[in-house]
Amino acid sequence: MNTSPLISTDRITQRFPGVVALRDVSLDIAAGELRAIVGENGAGKSTLMKILAGIHTGYVGDLRLRGQVVRFGGTGEAEAAGISIIHQELNLVEQLSVAANLFLGREKRTSLGLLDDREMERIAGELLRDLECLAKPRQLVAELRVGDQQLVEIAKALSIQTEVLIMDEPTSALTETEVARLYRVIGRLRERGVTILYISHKLDEVFRLADRITVLRDGQLIRTLEARDTTPREIAHLMVGRDVESFEREAAPSSPLPSGDSPTSSPLPPGEGSGVRERGAKPQSKHTATPPHPSPLPGGEGTRASCNVLLEVANLSLPWSGHARQWRLKDISFQLRSGEVLGVAGLMGAGRTELLECLFGAAAERPTGTIQLEGRTVAFEHPAEAVSAGVALVTEDRKRLGLFSQMTVGQNISLCAMRHTVSAGFVRPRRERELALQTAKDLSVRMPGIDAAITGLSGGNQQKCIIGRWLLTKPKVLLLDDPTRGVDVGAKAELYRLIRRLCRDGIGVIVTSSELPELLILCDRILVLCEGRLTGEFRRSDASEQAIMEAATKRSMKSEV
Amino acid sequence: MQFFRRHEWGLLLVILLMIVLTTLLDSRHNYWNDPRQSAINILRQTSFLGIIALGAAVVIISGGIDLSSGSMIAFSGSVCAVLLVLLAPNEMRNSLPVGWGVISTAIAGTLLAGFLIGSLHAWLITVVGLPPFVATLATLVGLRSFARALVDNVTTSVWRASKSQIDVADDTFRNFAKHLWIPATLFALLAVVTWIMLSRTVLGRHLYALGGNEQAARLSGIRTEKLKWFAYVFSAMLSSLAGMLYVADTSTANPQMLGQGYELNAIAAAVVGGCSLQGGVGTIPGTVLGVLFLRIVIDGVAKIIKSGADVYEGLIVGMVVVLAVAFAQLRGVARGGKRFFAGPLGVVAAVNLALIAGAAAALFSQKAKLAASQFGGVTALAVFGLLIGVRWLEGRRERRS
């Protein structure tokens, strides 16, 4: 590695207006290695990768490729030099076919100068077969699942003789099966000698894949470690620069279960129509994946949830017109007590978000079944009705569905509680500021000031602002849709603590997450959805990653339909 | 909320600059010799355009667009005149006073028509699901011809004589626009009310939220459909008001000519004033200054080249919009090393700008009785040389860094 690094950066500094995104980063990457780049949000991982891929060109310092100083003027030049990047938000034209996307900008032509679709489709087909991708070259990209779209991007990178492939959080939107397939593809790429730079939040996959791990923090390179000489705990420690809270999982990374392989031997209860329930999975699976952790609550779970039923859902179904499955959700029944944290687990597309939207009156179609809030039957037709009844929803996609990026921190917080700032019909700016400031302080939002732009805050602090926005409406039921997505380790712990505090005040919380360990730490009970059905319900003491994952991948449910 | 941000201060500065320039370049020095009359003229024009620009600004801030205001002016002017004809056929025919009762009924009816058209827009957009551009494009095209048919049919059936326009001679009605203070006060009042509504009420905050992120607004429990209804009705009713003022001003309701192309001037004024067509951004003080700026530039050019200035109005508005928005957006970009004249498109852009500058110079010199072709040619060449120089400098700066 020291003799001839494939890529090396020499004291690279990248400034953006107002911030230094990278400061004096010097890094060597050997040919053929898989290097993981980890760090909290805003640590500079993506910036560094964008410099390598020719997207940011205004940096200071030297970038060397095979010992030669290079400075790419754009992604085209970087690709010509053999460096491709696969962005977190995929870069495909959804209205074009897979083959057209693969050859976008490098279209093959016939002797007449017309597009040679047949040739392009043939090559695309070969590449996709290599990657175990089921997509057809003629299919429109919009019709593909995210995992397949990602493989199209990888195929594209391969078709231009890529030597260095940069992957920015490639598993963030994949199902377990797709993740397993991606791992196999990565293995095959490595056999071909492709050097891979892998950005990720998830330490377990980093340890599974990487040779070496580079930790960035606040734009600076902290350390590069051999993966076999270190532990997730040490890396997490380096990432946050402080001791990770006790909420973090204590020990070794879990092994994600290859779905579909596990036999679904657990007996299916007969409860047709009333929702399928399963209490207590197989005893041997208990605590295999999750080590026991001290109960973070004084008094334990027994005292937290009172017997006071806050929300009762019976036979909730959400139709899906024009889709083969007919329904997004089918016969869901459960209860939420005040002071309880109820988790909703499930793979992507299982209906987690749809369930929360139904409870909030924001579903795409009108759900059937009954929802009772504190004993009264409710049927919200607009989120406004849910809000005034005391239900709040923190949406999954913060940027698209939660933030008002042109507003200040204060305005983002106060938005749903404007009526408290009004007297005689007019908004009192001072009262609004005080309200927002108080909330921000309460949730310890770290910000330059209440009048700062919301976009300047880190993901975790933005999320706190949005939660604050909803707390000002004094909700009885708080729905959190994957609240820690894109939030760094330190802020996650703070969010967990916040959720606990809210429960002590008697709020009922329903939380979904794509990370099972998070649900296991946070929830009193966990519901498991699979393809729109309730396939399991666990108390915290009975739950394990293994058992939940089995319930979430119960393919046998299909036969019942 | 601050009263003026950087954008507004910038506009104010440019407005003052334009006034000074016009005073100096105008050979009759109207602004210096007769400031009162000049101010009245500008204020009158500003008030008329400003009223519809307020509506445009509210719709744009809420994330929509209203292309119909020009046709809406023609339509509501015609509706008002038609109501007058129906209520007082003989008086209208013989240019006699029609009385307060008839006038108030006509005004109320016209505002009701504005409410109905605004509601139609809101229905098409929120319920049918048309994009605002399409919904208001339909009424832009449709309302003017509807207004012509209305005038034609009503005059035929009431007076037994088909007319393409209706003269409104009633002095009471004409007085609404004759004295400057009525339109100006109306505009000032509406501007203040709209400003307070946007900056100091929940409704206003929700409009900004709607424009900034519609889905997030809905998921925050905001009734986005009702807000859109409000915004489009607000815009349509202000256009109705402006339509009546225009009829009062010209003493005639001519649906073919009335408000022709005004929707774009109103949108331009809002955009120059800092409203973003993406929604969620913009202020009323900015919009008012935008209107004022637009009118002062138009007036200044008219003063300088004397006759036939209306020919150049569109050209000026176009240039002002491009310059104002470009300056607002490019503040930071030039420092970041962006090249404006790189590549073949850069060369064509330089040719384009040189030709525009040359043509403008030629037209200007012709008005000023100078040798037009020489003056234009020299200007075009000079601008082209300058831009090619800029291109070369940009390239060198990039190679160096």
Image (tube, coloured by chain):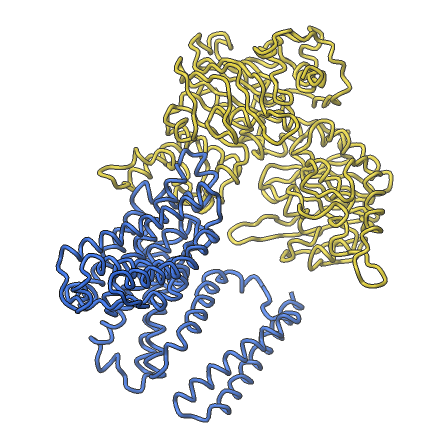
Chain colours: A yellow, B blue
Say whether residue B119 is visible: yes
Rendered-image quadrant of the C terminus of chain A: top right
Rendered-image quadrant of the N terminus of chain A: top right
The quadrant holding residue A131 is: top right
Pick the front one: A80 or B79:
B79
Pick the front one: A342 or B278:
B278
Tell me residue B20's x, y (percent). 31, 77
Specify whether B232 is left or right of A206.
left
Vertical placement of residue B389 versus B196, above or below: below
Specify whether A48 is left or right of A451.
right
Q: Residue at x 45, y 55 (%)?
A: B138
Pick the front one: B81 or A25:
B81
Vertical placement of residue A491 versus B184, above or below: above
Identity of the residue furthest to the front in this view: B160
Q: Residue at x 39, y 23 (%)?
A: A390
Say whether residue A1 is visible: no
Tell me residue B230's x, y (percent). 34, 45
The quadrant holding residue B386 is: bottom right
Tell me residue A514's x, y (percent). 62, 27
Q: Residue at x 28, y 66 (%)?
A: B253
Pick the front one: B225 or A231:
B225
Tell me residue A354's x, y (percent). 55, 27
Vertical placement of residue A525 versus B252, above or below: above
The quadrant holding residue A409 is: top left
Count all numbered tags in the image, as a single digit. Answer: 0
